[in-house]
Amino acid sequence: MIIALSVLLFFLLLMVGLDVGYSMIVAALAGMLLHAGDAVDPIMVPMTLVSNVDSAALVAVPLFVLAGEIMNQGGLTRRLVEWSTAMVGHFRGSLSQVAMTTNLVMAGISGSAVADATATGGMLIPAMKREGYKPGYAAAVIAAGAMLGPILPPSIPMVVYAVIANISVAKLFIGGVIPALMLFFGYVGICAYMARKHNYRAKPRVQWREQVRTTRIAIWALMVPVLVVGGIRSGVITETEAAGAICIYALAVGLLVYRDLKFRQLGRVFYSAGKTSAVILFLLAAAGPFSWLMSEAHIATMISETVLGISKDPLVVLLVVNVMLLLVGMVFEPLPALVMFVPTLLPIQAALGIDPIHFATVVIINLMIGMLHPPVGLLILITSAIGRVRIWSVAVETLPFLGWSLVVLVLISVFPALVTWLPNMAVR
């Protein structure tokens, strides 16, 4: 009963506009004060706030955020757009193909869908609109491409999940590669079809000498994903060390190679990265009291028994979990959903013996899909604001990309090897 009242209070606070983190803390405190039986000391609130972020692995989160911010300000994003234009600009619907290719490479740099959408959308949505693309479609292309960010390494949601579930970050990183490529090639196919349907133009083919020149210029940016994955895979550096190394690398490239980043801008860069990191880490901390309260009430056990009561078949259970998380994604953004619901889902994964990397990847991709559909649809909101387009028109144009995303989700749920084969081969 107390849990039901806390959850109800949580949703009421969200409806009146209180931040998700503060809503969780207030609802948890109310639940503790009304706890049946022995009273719960309110000191549990600050204790669980601190304990939930007391993990060395979480140091990678602000470092990856900082690396992405440095790269955006240091000219790496612009070079990636120029490189993508030279490589795929001659395909039909060139700018949409450029957007997808740029976001694929950006996904291996920032690990944040929001950062990728902001960086590429600011340049490419206006460009697509100038070339006659439907405004809603231009924003939808960026939204779909940016969704790749948290699925390819490095990925902030994957680091968060790995900390919660105590699994290998490196394996989880690599497990997202094949699903991300499946999404990418499907999105590219959709862009080609839409270009043919609406007669979107292609740019003239760039000569190979120009392609070589552009690649030589962009090589500093293109090397970032290789350094992250290669360094972790080889065992030379850990995930956290990789995040720190990429920050140093990005600073050196932005300041000394491209020289788009000036020393006087560093204060603004660190401030922006600090704000973003604070939001993420505060959200994780705020989930501590709420998770403790739900643990005390054995909510995870109740949800696990309910789901397992439907079926003991891992595939059926995965499909049930997918439906549940798709509904969750209609209300919650991915990170709040992760910190609130993953602890309740882990007993299900353990009870059925589902591979933890497979289960984690399915959960993460499911919640990322939530960024592409209303009513929350974070990427739809961001790209519509960047492109000054009506939200509804973006949501409608996103439907083909959303449909393919659901197909990929079903495929990786049914065929675990699409997720597990590569990390089992790469990380021993």
Image: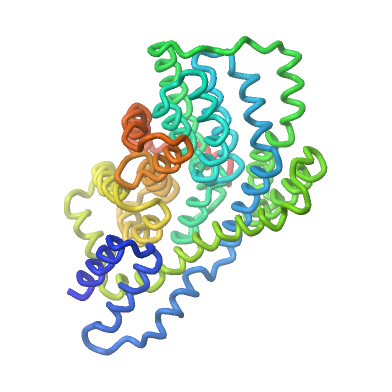
Check the image and report above or below for 188 versus 329: above
Residue furthest right as drawn = 256
Q: Residue at x 50, y 59 (%)?
A: 280
**Residue 10 visible:** yes
**Residue 338, x across and y down, in percent:** 39, 56
Q: Residue at x 59, y 65 (%)?
A: 56
**Residue 234, x across and y down, in percent:** 68, 45
Instruction: Report the coloring of the rendering.
Output: rainbow
34 lies left or right of 175: left
Query: Of 239 and 370, which appears nearest the observer?
Result: 370
Query: Of 271 and 214, which appears nearest the observer?
Result: 271
Q: Residue at x 63, y 10 (%)?
A: 205
**Residue 21, x across and y down, in percent:** 40, 65
**Residue 42, x across and y down, in percent:** 37, 85
359 lies left or right of 93: left
Quadrant showing the N terminus: bottom left
Dividing the picture into quarters, in which one does residue 29 lie? bottom left
**Residue 420 visible:** no
Q: Residue at x 37, y 62 (%)?
A: 20
Check the image and report above or below for 229 versus 356: above
Dividing the picture into quarters, in which one does residue 340 lie? bottom left
Callout count: 0
Query: Of 68 and 410, which appears nearest the observer?
Result: 68
